[in-house]
Image: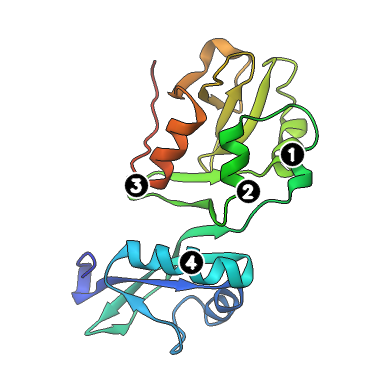
Amino acid sequence: MGDDLEGGLVTRWGAAGAGDLERIEAAGWREWPADLSLFDDRAEAVRAARDKFVPAEGAGHVLRVPTRDGTPAGVIVEEADYRGPVPEGEFAGEPELPKAWREYLRSSSWLRRGWLPSGKYVWLYPPAEADRLLSIWEAEGTHPGIALIGGDGGLENFVLDLRQDPAPVLLVSNASQGWDDAVVQAADVETFLARIDDGTFDLTWHD
């Protein structure tokens, strides 16, 4: 069973498609659709979102559902958002991204954004979105070889330094003026993604 909450509430987990999420939002995030299952284990909801809803609708959502005596009660919270394969055409331009990153975004389902079991929030960007954000940020002049791949939902960004092989995953703030203040999060994309998928990723603030 999920974590015990205040007032006799217990957390259960739900999986929903894009249309289902619209229904939940329309109900003020307080009603769980009767035709959708609830799970005692978060991992079960993740599997349902990735294996059932992503292939069918292109997106699958994991939600935290407070319950009392098995009945939904309280505010429902989106925990994670998974998406289907990014179109191959998004990888046609420059710079050339690491193979592991391309394969992850082209896989049957990948984490778009959400809370990890470690308690950290991660938001990952497909190439077209990353390019738009990077042009707004104007970091290419101060960070040669940079590729933006995600962020923490706030002011910190996950980037690659493509001058290195393999390219490390680095943490760089919006206020950064160069590579000197970047902090290594993982030695390469494979390590970063493994920790995202198993839920153990945590921010490192000092090298």
**Considering only order in the chain, which callout, 1 or 4, is on the residue closer to the N terminus?**
4
Q: Using the numbered discs, state the Cα–Cα distance from disc 3 to disc 1 in whole angstroms.
A: 31 Å
Query: What's under tag 2, amino acid-wise?
Result: Arg
Q: Residue 144, image x and y in percent?
A: 70, 14
Q: Which of marks 3 and 2 is in front?
A: 2
Point 76% across, 33% down: residue: 136
**Considering only order in the chain, which callout, 3 or 4, is on the residue closer to the N terminus?**
4
Q: Name the residue under label 4.
A: 51
Q: Mark 1 points at which residue?
A: 91
Q: Residue 195, image x and y in percent?
A: 39, 39
Point 52% across, 14% down: residue: 181
Quarter containing the N terminus: bottom left
**Considering only order in the chain, which callout, 2 or 3, is on the residue closer to the N terminus?**
2
Q: Residue 3, image x and y in percent?
A: 22, 64
Q: Which of marks 3 and 1 is in front?
A: 1
Name which quarter of the figure residue 158 lies in.
Answer: top right
Pointer 3 with pointer 1, Cβ within 8 A: no
Q: Mark 3 points at which residue?
A: 119
Name which quarter of the figure residue 22 lies in.
Answer: bottom right
Element type at mark 3? loop
Q: In this view, does 119 lie above or below 176?
A: below
Q: Name the residue under label 2.
A: 106
**Considering only order in the chain, which callout, 4 or 2, is on the residue closer to the N terminus?**
4
The residue closer to the viewer here, 88 or 28, is: 88
Element type at mark 1? helix
Query: What's under tag 4, amino acid-wise?
Result: Asp
